[in-house]
Amino acid sequence: MLLGIVAVVLLLAVLFATFAALQYTRSAVLRDDQRHMREATNTLVREYNNRAEVDRLRNRQQLLRTAGAQASQVALTELTRVVLQNIDGLEGGFYAADGNMLIGYSSPTPSGANGRPSLQAITDHERQALLRVARDATISHTTSEQVLATGRDISLINAMPLWDGQRLIGSAWTAKRLATIPGTNRLRTYLIAMGLGIAALVCVLLTLLVVRGLQDGVRKIEDGLKNLEQSLESQIPIDSDPDEIRQIAQAINRLGATLKENIESEKKIEDRLRHAERLAALGRLIAGVAHEVRNPLATIRLRVQMCQDSENADVQRSCAIALQEVERLNGIVNRLLSFSRPVNLRTELTDLDRLVEQRLDNFSDRARRHNIKFITKLSHAPAPVPVDQSRLAQVFDNVIQNAIEAMSASGGTLCVNVTHEATNAEHGSEVCVEFNDTGEGIRSEVVERIFDPFFTTKSSGTGLGLSICHELVQAHGGKIQVASAQGCGTTVRILLPAGDRATAGNLA
């Protein structure tokens, strides 16, 4: 409805402006020509009055009173020619009231048989109009004008009365033919105006359609932003919207995805910070406890060793068992102290393939006893990796031992793969050591806590093994990941930065 009203109003405005412009143009042209004609007619009247004054002084009869005489007609024609000869396109003459006729005609274009202007060249319609205007000026005692349309042309007629001192005896007139001017051809004018109006209407329709499309796009973006406030996973649908709306929607979708990634990254960083804070607090506590326990253990060991010198076999057997437990407790204390101390790495270029094979060899006898098969797929990479061999060996041993314990009841397979993975140009490449066993697997709620200190599912475990592995791998600038499900085995992936050749050379 609003669109139709706006279109009609604009169309009427365009038509009105067109008609006003055409009317103004026509009126301006006619007004200017009429002014020049009045000046020329007034000059013709003034020259006639001067000639009549001379005739009175010479006691001659005025020319219009003797209009029928040949001499009077020639004299009036010459007078008209002299007055109008310097005015382009203007013709004129005189009107004699006594004979109701036009005399003294002069034109810039010769039309008579003798090469002189002649009233015979004027059409009857124009002659009658000239007589009417000249007679009206004589009768009304004032200037008379008329605009006469003749086919495609327009004729302007102007007449002013003439006095002989006592009465009006006629008038002087001028006329001018104008070619087609703006507004003469009405049909063409209407067509032009209609074309302008239609063009304006089309422009308005297109503008309103574009505005409507933009409004729909803006509403869609507003709805998308509201949905984005509820969930960063929401996306603004991109359909057949204008390019500008599509670009804005795509930018908002990218912004939502980026915000989601940043928030998730911040959560991970916060989790790691909290985990590090907990580890630091536990480390300080563990260090104090370990130092307090270590001294009593040393005393107990010494006393038990002294008692072992007894000749009583039962006493010796009891002492041997006590020493084993003391050694176990001492190992726990050492692991606690190792967990509480900061990790200091002594990196050297290491062949990971060879290191993996060495650690698997150490568990080969135990694996055979439990019917466990080792399968290795090594990278055979020519470039060694800068790592701390002893610390990384500790990580591999812990992972291999956990895998064997997970499969010890029924046997199974442990697959170890060493691969080089290309990352981005900033971080270089990585080496991945993957351990995949066919054991019982781990429940999902347990996997989330597997690296927490003192968390274990074993009856005799301390819950520090994987925590220490996590710290050692992070100290190397790497990552350790565990993927498992109940009854589907467990996969442990250790990612280590491979370093570049320049770094390898410096470490060598």
Image (tube, rainbow, N blue to C red):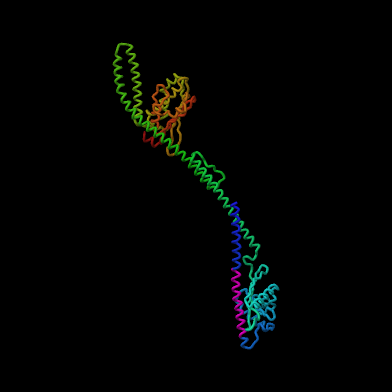
The residue drawn where x is 63% and y is 70% is: 178
Is 29 colored magenta in this rendering? yes
Quarter of the rendering containing residue 389:
top left
**Lateral position of residue 373 relative to residue 31, left or right:** left
Quarter of the rendering containing residue 9:
bottom right
Establish if 257 lies above or below 209. Answer: above
Callout count: 0
Q: Whole-percent x and y of residue 412?
A: 48, 22
Q: Whole-percent x and y of residue 185?
A: 65, 64
The residue drawn where x is 33% and y is 18% is: 323
- Report the quarter where the C terminus lies: top left
Q: Whole-percent x and y of residue 83?
A: 61, 79
* Residue 360 in view of the camera: no
Q: Whole-percent x and y of residue 164?
A: 63, 83
Specify the segment rendered in magenta.
28-53
Is 33 colored magenta in this rendering? yes
**Lateral position of residue 419 relative to residue 199, left or right:** left
Establish if 75 lies above or below 234. Answer: below
- In-front residue for pair 167/176: 167
**Lateral position of residue 84 relative to residue 258, left or right:** right
- In-front residue for pair 398/21: 21
* Residue 449 in view of the camera: yes
- In-front residue for pair 272/402: 272
Q: Main secondary structure of the magenta part?
A: helix
